[in-house]
Image (cartoon, rainbow, N blue to C red):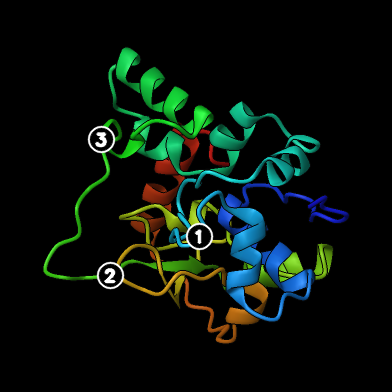
Amino acid sequence: MGIAYFPEIYPDELIYSVLARYYVQSGYPAYIFCAEDVFADKKVRPDIEFLNVMRLEVLEALFKKKSMAVLVEKHTMFPYYARFLPYERRNRAFEALCSMGGNYNNLLAIPKQKNGEHRYLRYCPLCTEEDRTFYGESYWHRIHQLAGVGICPVHGCKLLNSSVIISGKASPNLVAAEQEIKEMDIIYGNEIEKQLAGYVCSGQAFL
């Protein structure tokens, strides 16, 4: 298969997000048909925070936009989870992600979920409005998915949960932000929350 069209990758967009937009915009009748074209294993659950092993055609389409190193650094959660790792371990995790052949989960400091709680893809209503104005659609931002940060570091308003579970036993799927985001309530955080969000993001070059 040759990919005739592939979406532009937006600033701070998760790889999962651009694949979800590709799925919607390409007109596939069902997710499984898209999975057959995108992933090496069509039964794999799409990795929201990082990336899965993808077919050569998809990689070629992505590499027309950015290198694999840039994709990992700027479009996955790698900088957040690797920030406090020793240099050698961080490099091993980075190489595992770039090669799509290593077990990066064992190398990165990814906290386990407690008491069966789920994390969900989150969004900022003001970022959503801006994205729709500038790009004609919304997308999933990395900075909105930082664990422990409850407000948007750009606008200072509360982040809202979508229905998309980041990890768990949900059925494999690709859900685009534009189809998912409906609620747009704007509630601003306090000064301490703003400072925390700014500290976490600026320290890891997420902004």
Viewer-proximal residue, 72 or 200? 72
Which circle's residue, 1 or 3, is located before the other in the chain?
3
- 97 up-or-down from 112: above or below: above
Q: Please tell me how crowded label 3 is: few (under 14), some (14-19), or many (20+) other residues with Cα within 10 Å.
A: few
Secondary element at image label 1: loop
Question: Which label lies toward us, 1 or 3?
Answer: 3
* Residue 46 place in picture, x, y as percent: 48, 59
Which quadrant, please, contains the C terminus? top right
Q: Residue at x 58, y 71 (%)?
A: 32
Q: Residue under circle 1?
A: 152
Q: Residues within 10 Å of mark 2 (few under 14, many from 20)?
A: few
Q: Nearer the viewer, mark 1 or mark 2?
A: 2
Q: Amino acid at mark 3?
A: Asn
The residue labelled by disc 3 is 106
**Lower sequence index among marks 1 and 2:** 2
Dot 2 corresponds to which residue?
118
